[in-house]
Image (cartoon, rainbow, N blue to C red):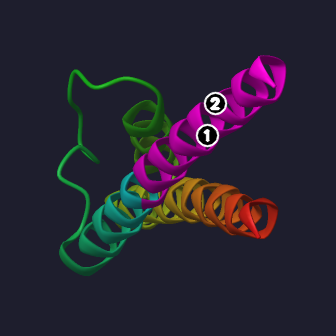
């Protein structure tokens, strides 16, 4: 009986952790999508140069090779893509958690 209780308790803890993780990923993805849309609408702040790292570096390279508009569109598109992937991951975790809970 105690073993069954411990297994149930572990499953409950795992469901709670999956819910927190899935919710966090979903919220993070939605904010990433919103950031990408904001960059596409108003243009990238860091397209002409900045101290930020990977995404801004890629947009800076594209802005230097082509023009600043290409850098802004690429930064917004990258943020949209990453945000969408993270949001889908969070949604899938939450959906899978609800299926296993039934």
Q: Are marks 1 and 2 in contact (CB under 8 Å)?
A: yes
The quarter holding residue 18 reads: top right
Residue 70's x, y, as percent? Answer: 46, 63
The answer to whether residue 20 is magenta is yes
The answer to whether residue 91 is magenta is no
**Magenta highlight: main SS:** helix
Residue behind mark 2: 9
Secondary structure beneath dot 1 equals helix
Between residues 9 and 95, which one lies in front from this camera angle?
Answer: 9
Which residues are drawn in magenta?
A: 1-26
Residue 12's x, y, as percent? Answer: 61, 40
User: Which mark, residue 35?
Assistant: none
Q: Residues within 10 Å of mark 1 (few under 14, many from 20)?
A: few
Q: Residues within 10 Å of mark 2 (few under 14, many from 20)?
A: few
Q: Residue furthest front?
A: 1
Residue at position x 58%, y 57% in the image: 90
Residue 36's x, y, as percent? Answer: 37, 65
Between residues 61 and 44, which one lies in front from this camera angle?
Answer: 44
Answer above or below: position of 72 versus 61: below
Residue behind mark 1: 12
Between residues 10 and 40, which one lies in front from this camera angle?
Answer: 10
Q: Disc 1 and disc 2: Cα gap in Å?
A: 5 Å
Residue at position x 37%, y 37% in the image: 56
Q: Quadrant of the N terminus?
A: top right
Residue at position x 23%, y 34% in the image: 49
Secondary structure beneath dot 2 equals helix
Q: Quadrant of the C terminus?
A: bottom right
Answer above or below: position of 38 versus 18: below
């Amino acid at each position: 009986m105690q073993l069954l209780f411990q297994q149930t308790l572990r499953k409950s803890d795992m469901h709670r952790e999956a819910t927190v993780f899935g919710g966090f990923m979903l919220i993070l993805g939605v904010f990433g999508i919103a950031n990408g849309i904001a960059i596409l609408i108003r243009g990238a702040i860091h397209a002409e140069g900045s101290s930020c790292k990977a995404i801004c570096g890629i947009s800076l390279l594209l802005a230097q090779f082509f023009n600043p508009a290409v850098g802004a569109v690429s930064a917004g598109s990258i943020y949209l893509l990453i945000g969408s992937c993270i949001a889908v991951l969070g949604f899938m975790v939450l959906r899978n958690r609800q299926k296993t809970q039934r």
